[in-house]
Image: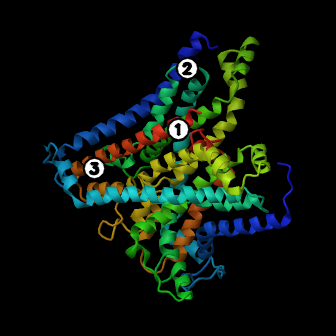
């Protein structure tokens, strides 16, 4: 359809995007890789030397490292579990005939638009505060002792906050998928005497499979990088109890001034993200190619 | 489905849905309520009826100069989105209207740049920003957010442009339209809704971005995300002020978000779910 001239023009129009993204991907990553082999501390910038694999060894032997990897995975899996199961349940609920459906939808998706520091600080202070929070009020009301959430269950508290932020996303996408399910198919299944549970397992769930995979893929990308929620609530503590890999790298880089160590951590984060991405892309690829 | 549902059943579902929806919305609702309380009221136990004082709002402006981070957020979010659109529209256009064998690969590659963890390039970006004098500057942050959202912008635009039928172009060409005429009179009007949706979603994403905005700013260019973080180590009573600042920070985006529910699904799933 296109003439030769428009084809050439079309190639040309892609150049700015491709170059920008190429530079953005290659230059900083190459620098991180380079720094990861250097002994480089910002407090002593005159004294930079080649360190070989020292930084990696250092990171590897740091007990905080394994804990942070573990915490990263726990956060990702915990939030995925809550949001996918909760999202399916909510989508099914919102798909029912309801008075005021539009408003209900708006209420449910709202948390997604709340910026992470606001979400985390509101939960930390007004809901989960052991003295004045709403949870503490409820606990006292039913005669229990209020829980100091961030001291006793730091990781769980963060998972709870992040899950609240992402539940609307999962719900919205699963609901969209649910609504594209053919009504006639549902009725046919009903006429054939299929019960609600059997209809859900054999008809609804397979139909939503693609949307579920998409939800898992996209959320994982964002969940691997959770940062602000930790910064304003537990600051990674107590100890390293709620430090994930991004937070550990931030601590090493900007609080420890250790450029080499943080870069080694960065490279490990890239490898981790790539393993997850490869694994997910394979699963999703099968689903996306219709 | 042309089935009528018994009112009783509908009423049951309605109650269940409203209860769940209000529970999910509760933290936001409570923030808004608390923003109209005084500081002593705010810690006086659970209470959904505020005294209605605007004291916290006044103090957020007078003590913390709220307007400045707000304007920074506006400039950075809108600026980075417009920049990204300028770069992405030609690319998405060309991929949608004259795709090649490699178009799919290029799109997948662009998506893969989103998977690079931000924290992996924290050190080099911090050093580059420091050496170029971009730390705590609106320009630096605007470019940064443009880069991280560019893949999403290209993808979104691509999925919208692909839906514009190619036959229309051919018809226009038959009628003797020039390339320029084709773009201005035929394609642009059809592309505007897609561009508008992309604009909306990306302003939301840029507004709420909370890694680079916090790490690359201190005071001058700090947008609302960084401003709110400063409430994590407060002095004295601050809940009502935190609530007022939070309400102001989320209100505009909440409203934009309500209008862009449909586009949100499309944009964030890269067209995989519609």
Q: Quadrant of the N terminus of chain A?
A: top right
In the image, residue B63 sits, relative to residue A92, either above or below, namely: below
Nearest-to-viewer mark from 1 and 3: 3
In the image, residue B109 sits, relative to residue B20, either above or below, namely: above
Q: Quadrant of residue B57?
A: bottom right
Q: Mark 3 packing: few (<14 Cα in 10 Å), some, or many (20+)? A: many
Residue at the spot of label 3: A265
Q: Mark 2 packing: few (<14 Cα in 10 Å), some, or many (20+)? A: many
Q: Position of residue B67 (x, y in %)?
A: 54, 62
- Considering the numbered disc 1 on the image, is that residue within a helix, a strand or a loop? helix
Name, please, the residue furthest toward the bottom. Answer: A143
Q: Quadrant of the C terminus of chain A?
A: top right
Q: Position of residue B125 (x, y in %)?
A: 34, 45
Q: Is residue A272 left or right of residue B94?
A: left
At x 75%, y 47%, the residue is A189
Mark 2 and mark 1 in contact? Answer it, CB < 8 Å.
no
In the image, residue A252 sits, relative to residue B101, either above or below, namely: below
* C-alpha span from label 1 to label 3: 30 Å
Host chain of mark 1? B
Q: Is residue B224 visible?
A: no
Host chain of mark 2? A
At x 72%, y 24%, the residue is B186
Q: Is residue A40 left or right of residue A125?
A: left
Q: Position of residue B149 (x, y in %)?
A: 50, 42
Q: Is residue A159 left or right of residue A185?
A: left
Residue at the spot of label 1: B84
């Amino acid at each position: 359809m296109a003439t030769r001239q428009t084809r050439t023009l079309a190639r040309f129009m892609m150049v700015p995007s491709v170059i920008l993204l190429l530079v953005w991907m290659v230059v900083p990553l190459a620098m991180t890789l380079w720094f990861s082999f250097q002994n480089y501390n910002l407090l002593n910038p005159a004294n930079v030397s080649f360190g070989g694999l020292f930084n990696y060894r250092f990171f590897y032997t740091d007990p905080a490292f394994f804990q942070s990897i573990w915490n990263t995975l726990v956060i990702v899996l915990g939030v995925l579990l809550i949001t996918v199961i909760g999202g399916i349940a909510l989508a099914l609920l919102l798909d029912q005939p309801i008075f005021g459906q539009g408003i209900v939808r708006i209420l449910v998706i709202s948390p997604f638009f709340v910026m992470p520091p606001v979400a985390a600080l509101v939960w930390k202070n007004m809901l989960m505060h052991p003295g004045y929070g709403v949870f503490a009020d409820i606990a006292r009301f039913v005669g229990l002792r209020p829980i100091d959430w961030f001291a006793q269950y730091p990781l769980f508290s963060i998972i709870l906050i992040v899950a609240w932020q992402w539940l609307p996303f999962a719900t919205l996408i699963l609901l969209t998928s649910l609504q594209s399910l053919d009504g006639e198919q549902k009725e046919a299944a009903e006429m054939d005497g299929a019960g609600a549970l059997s209809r859900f397992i054999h008809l609804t769930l397979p139909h939503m499979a693609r949307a579920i995979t998409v939800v898992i893929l996209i959320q994982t990308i964002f969940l691997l990088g959770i940062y602000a929620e930790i910064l304003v609530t537990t600051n990674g503590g107590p100890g390293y109890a709620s430090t994930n890999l991004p937070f550990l790298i931030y601590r090493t880089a900007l609080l420890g001034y250790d450029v080499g160590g943080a870069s080694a951590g960065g490279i490990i984060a890239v490898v981790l993200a790539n393993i997850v991405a490869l694994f997910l892309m394979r699963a999703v690829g099968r689903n996306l190619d219709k | 489905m042309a089935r009528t549902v018994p009112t009783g059943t509908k009423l049951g579902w309605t109650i269940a849905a409203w209860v769940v929806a209000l529970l999910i919305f509760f933290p936001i609702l409570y923030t808004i309520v608390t923003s109209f309380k005084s500081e002593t009221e705010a810690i006086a136990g659970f209470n959904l009826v505020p005294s209605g004082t605007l004291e916290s709002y006044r103090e957020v402006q007078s003590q913390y100069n709220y307007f400045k981070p707000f304007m920074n957020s506006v400039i950075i979010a809108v600026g980075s989105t417009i920049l990204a659109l300028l770069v992405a529209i030609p690319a998405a256009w060309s991929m949608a209207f004259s795709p090649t064998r490699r178009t799919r690969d290029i799109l997948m590659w662009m998506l893969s740049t989103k998977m690079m963890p931000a924290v992996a390039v924290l050190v080099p970006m911090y050093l580059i920003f420091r050496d170029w004098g971009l730390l705590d500057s609106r320009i630096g942050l605007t470019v940064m957010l443009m880069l991280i959202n560019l893949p999403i912008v290209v993808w979104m635009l691509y999925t919208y442009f692909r839906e514009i039928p190619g036959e229309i172009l051919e018809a226009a060409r038959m009628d003797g339209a020039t390339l320029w005429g084709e773009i201005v009179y035929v394609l642009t009007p059809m592309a505007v809704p897609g561009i508008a949706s992309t604009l909306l979603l990306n302003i939301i994403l840029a507004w709420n971005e909370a890694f680079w905005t916090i790490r690359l700013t201190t005071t001058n260019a700090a947008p609302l995300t960084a401003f709110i973080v400063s409430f994590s180590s407060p002095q004295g009573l601050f809940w009502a002020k935190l609530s007022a600042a939070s309400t102001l920070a989320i209100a505009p985006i909440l409203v934009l978000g309500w209008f862009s529910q449909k586009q949100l699904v499309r944009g964030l799933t890269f067209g995989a779910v519609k």
